[in-house]
Image (cartoon, rainbow, N blue to C red):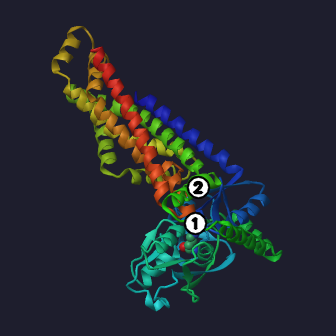
Amino acid sequence: MMHIVKHILLSIYIGVLLLGHSAFADRILMVTEATFPPYEYHEGEEIKGIDPEIMNEVAKRMNKKLVVEDMSFDSVITAVVSGKADVAASGITITEERKKQVDFSLPYVEAAQVIVIKKDSAIQSADDLKGKRIGVQHGTTGDTYVTKNIQQPERFPNAALVISALTAGKIDVAVIDQDPAKMFLAKEKELQILPKPLVMEQYAIAVKKGNQELLNRINSTILDLQSTGKLKEICAKHTNVILNQAKTTPNAPTGFWAELKDDFNTNFIRESRWKYLVEGFLITIEISFFSVLVGIFMGFIVAVIRSTYDKTGKLRFLNALCKIYLTVIRGTPVVVQLLIIYFVIFGSVDISKIIVAIVAFGFNSGAYVAEIIRSGIMSIDKGQFEAGRSLGLNHTQTMLYIILPQAFKNVLPALGNEFIVLLKETSVSGYIALADLTKGGDIIRSQTYTAFLPLMAVAIIYLAIVMLFSHLLNKLEQRLKNNE
Ligand code: ARG
């Protein structure tokens, strides 16, 4: 048994390693947080902007294909450090702390943190910020500056949400990067940027420490783009795209129904944004489905080992292993497990994030399923065991043919419950940049700056899945009852 397990684990490991190498050879994986125009922004299916375009030039010169991935800004540097990604290009400011983690390219832009307020605000300079509600993007230099020099800010996942919070009156000031601030303000007419920047900074591209070859390529590309004037062109191009978009956005209509209709159009119809929900839905279903399978598989094995030990005293070692598994999994939050599996366990292998999620949620669920099934096994009358044995069945046969089927029937409602929980727990997949249903709604939200409709749509879709699932489960229960 142990031998087979070892063998399987080893082949999976080798497979994963090979997968990593072949994929690394001909592509460059760039990570970014793509709600940061003009440096990076979503346009339809694609992530465009100054950073992807610079990196595209680098990739072209290396005869490689650029793959761009969107994740939370506070993860982009970690992704490079852990080897998940080759470069982080995300309007990243060069700082001493970050230099300890990664190597930076030559700077390619002079940037600044600025103060954004409502036009009718009484705030006039940085001196007036103390005690105000200050919003920043989590993990940015704006965040660090405000935290160190003023007070604890309110931290949002991206700059667009900081701006919507400001427009909605949830905060008094936004401290974000200058160029994106200008882009956002083209649409938000009631906001203004204070003329004096809070701090000046420089953007650069980050690579893993010691990746000299890639760093040299990036540097020579930057120098090249600067000397030919191409860099300026790229910057101007993306700035204009964003400003033109803002101009062509029609004025919002008034009246409840007209507004709702307009919101509906912006959030779902325009730029085919509904696709984020459909694709997210499919990913959520895919992750949930396979996690349930992994969970049932793990759960069954663990439950059988544990109850065999309880009943016969055999399998002492495996039982101890199972106990550790249950304690660790049930004692830590699933998001933390997901992040550990992604960044630490599969840190330096290039593995599909869907698989990472299935492993994480499947192993997590397995722990709960195990206890549910064990309680089912324990609930079966001792006489059933004896009956099995007296029919001449051995322990395994009794388990398989007599105990487990009855146990399964008894715990079906509890299992159903566990799968409903699992489905909704997959909503944290966005932490590893998987575009699941919840994240799909987030992407729409960050593009349209409206909270209501995307969140409602996401909630309704989850609700529909759960209702359908409960319905099917009820039917199954009914069937089993009728079979009795
Ligand atoms: N320049 C700031 C920093 O390095 C903010 C960058 C945010 N970038 C982004 N793509 N969201 O901390």
Q: Earlier in the sequence, mark 2 or mark 1?
A: 1
Above or below for 28 versus 413 = below
Position of residue 431 in the picture relative to residue 314 (left or right): right
- Taking depth in this image into account, of 210 and 39 the one nearest to the observer is 39
Nearest the viewer among 121 and 132 is 121
User: Residue furthest toward the front?
Assistant: 255
**Which dot, 2 or 1, sits closer to the camera?**
1
Q: Is residue 360 visible?
A: no
The answer to which image quadrant residue 327 occupies is top left
- Residue type at numbered disc 1: Ala
Using a 10 Å C-alpha cutoff, classify the residue at mark 1 as few (fewer than 14 neighbours), some (14 to 19) or many (20 or more): few
440 over 403 or under it: above or below: below
Horizontal side, residue 221 vs residue 378: left or right: right
Tag 1 residue: 252
| Residue pictured at 48% horizontal, 81% vertical | 145
The image position of residue 173, as x and y in percent, is 47, 80
